[in-house]
Image (cartoon, coloured by chain):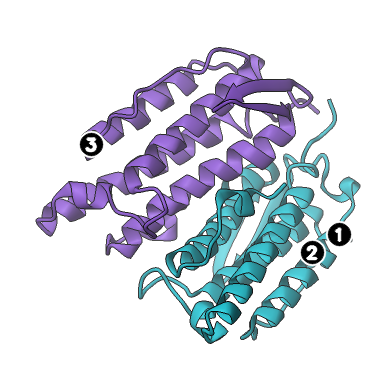
Chain colours: A cyan, B purple
Amino acid sequence: MTSAMYQSSIPVFIHNLNNLSNILKKAAAFAEAKKIDPAVLINSRLAPDMLPLVRQIQITSDTAKAGAARIAEIEVPSFEDNETTFDQLQERIAKTISFLQTIKPEQIDGKEELKIHYVQRNKENNYIGLPYLNCYVLPNLYFHITVAYAILRHNGVELGKKDYLGK
Amino acid sequence: MTSAMYQSSIPVFIHNLNNLSNILKKAAAFAEAKKIDPAVLINSRLAPDMLPLVRQIQITSDTAKAGAARIAEIEVPSFEDNETTFDQLQERIAKTISFLQTIKPEQIDGKEELKIHYVQRNKENNYIGLPYLNCYVLPNLYFHITVAYAILRHNGVELGKKDYLGK
């Protein structure tokens, strides 16, 4: 049995980012068809103290690139959080996918027991490779994609589970 | 390297079902404190054509038990979808966890290439073990838990990412 760390991370992240990209394409088309300012959707929230759509996309990107880089033991690429349009959000997703595609299976496989340590917002974080993927990266990734989907569904965009799951 | 299929499925499902149980406890306490009929939350939706909270919980349970049983190559336990109260939803989650706890690592590990075939609503489904877990079971599980969380947040229940991620 070879390690499944790569197969359970990088292609899964890319698959879900592509699904998110398709969901945002439908949202942009919806805004255009209904003559809604795209910024209304991009800044929409499910609760006043929940983050708007734009932040859900940025955090999905951050979760994927940081998760991948930390397991691969390379520097996390830093992207500015300055997107304000659907086109810019698509670019952000494409840039994230491009980074993920540079990571090779041998940088991820066998990292189940890897000690991961990083400091974020003055907080020390210590994880082990596989639980980091299973109990931190993946649940966060799916959380922010699902909230993005739910914000758009709540606003009337016609989406279905198939858009979320992809092919 | 031994297989990580068990570690990436059964304990992950149980961990997330426990988080969902804690989220529902906070929802029940919120309803009581605000003198809101719990049925209002249980039947709440984010869009008229999205499923209500009760169905999100039932489908989370279904996803976990069917995913586990199909990889373990045992019969999927059938639960009636008849819950109408928070206590009954807690029972449903507890029953699901009890079933998952009967599954042993040796029933799951090494099933990365397992051919999975089943018929659901007259549709033939064919999967391979690891992609079935990574691209069907886990995204569905996280989807329905996140939508449950989002329904409750949208209704004012005080929850945070920590409740979703658990310990």
Label 3 – label 1 distance at C-alpha: 46 Å
- Left or right side of A105 for A52: left
In the rendering, at what x and y percent does residue A129 appear?
Answer: 70, 45
Q: Secondary structure at mark 1?
A: helix
- Compared to residue A158, the image places residue A49 above or below, namely below
Residue B166 in sight = no
Type of the residue with mark 2: Ile
Type of the residue with mark 1: Gln
Q: Secondary structure at mark 3?
A: loop
Q: Are marks 2 and 1 on the same chain?
A: yes
**Residue at label 1?**
A101
- Compared to residue A5, the image places residue A95 above or below, namely below
Residue B106 in sight = yes
Residue A55 found in image quarter: bottom right
Q: Chain of mark 3?
A: B
Label 3 – label 2 distance at C-alpha: 43 Å
Labels 2 and 1 touching (C-beta < 8 A) = yes
Instruction: Name the residue rendered at 27%, 60% in the picture.
Output: B157
* Marks 3, 2: nearer the viewer: 3
Depth check: give the residue in front, A134 or A159: A159
Residue B18 found in image quarter: top left
Residue closest to the far front: A33
Crowd band around label 3 with a 10 angstrom C-alpha radius: few (<14), some (14–19), many (20+): few
Residue B11 got which mark? none
Type of the residue with mark 3: Thr
**Residue at label 3?**
B84
Instruction: Name the residue rendered at 29%, 35% in the picture.
Output: B89
- Compared to residue B106, the image places residue A43 above or below, namely below
In the rendering, at what x and y percent does residue A148 appear?
Answer: 54, 65
**Residue at label 2?**
A97
